[in-house]
Amino acid sequence: MPRYVAFLRAINVGGHVVKMAALKRHFEEAGCLEVETVIASGNVVFASASKSPAALERRIAAHLEERLGYAVATFLRTPSELAVVAGHRPFPRAELEATGHGLYVGFLAAAPDAGAQRRVLALQTPTDALAVLGRELYWRRHGGFSDSEISGAILERALGQPTTLRNVTTVRKMAAKTA
């Protein structure tokens, strides 16, 4: 049975508190099997007999909105897709290993068109480097999020679609868990 990783937006941020046991139950109610939550920020590993990841993504998002009372953007990746994301190196190694730098991955429902990619890349600053590959946005930060002129909301406006961000360490942990 195919396995998936879900990255959820608006879980345990902005006043939306969801216990991981409840989140697991919601996924099971949506027909998912072997459900495991990882870190309390909306990361879920599960199996499903669904042959359409896009339909499954929509079904889970609709179920979560019904149960939680607010929209939960849901981004599914297969283990092989996640391995590619975790292994991608969009910036020079020296930049990523420099003190104070961090790498974040933004998951998207669809690859942004050329106009959206141009708008995103235009946001770059000396402390924020951005790259897009397929359905992922890579953001290399120097310093904390509060030091940046860029925010998740600004990225979403430039992309023209929702995204959810994860530290690359979390992404690699999720990829290792499903390998």
Image (cartoon, helix red, strand yellow):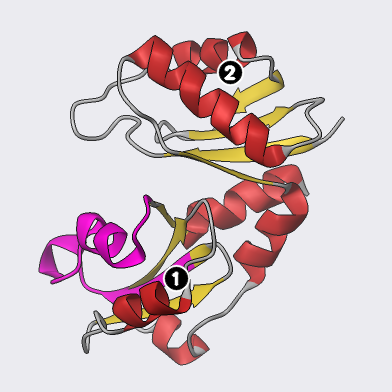
**What percent of the width, then of the height, locates residue 94?**
45, 90
Residue at left 69%, top 19%? 32
| SS type, badge 1 | strand
Residue 13 forms part of the magenta stretch = no
Picture coordinates of residue 26 (x, y %)? 52, 13
Q: Which residues are magenta?
A: 137-162
Disc 2 marks which amino acid?
A: Phe
The one of 63 and 25 positioned closer to us in this rendering? 63
Mark 1 Cα-neighbour bin, 10 Å: few <14, some 14–19, many ≥20: many
| CA distance separating discs 2 and 1 | 28 Å
Q: Quadrant of the N terminus?
A: top right
Q: Is residue 73 above or below residue 155?
A: above
**Which of 100 and 123 lies nearest the eye of the viewer?**
123
Mark 1: amino acid: Tyr
Look at mark 2 in the image and give the residue it sits on: 27
Q: Say if 71 sits above or below 79 in the image.
A: above
Side of 122 relative to 15 (left or right):
right
The residue depicted at 71 percent of the width and 57 percent of the height is: 81
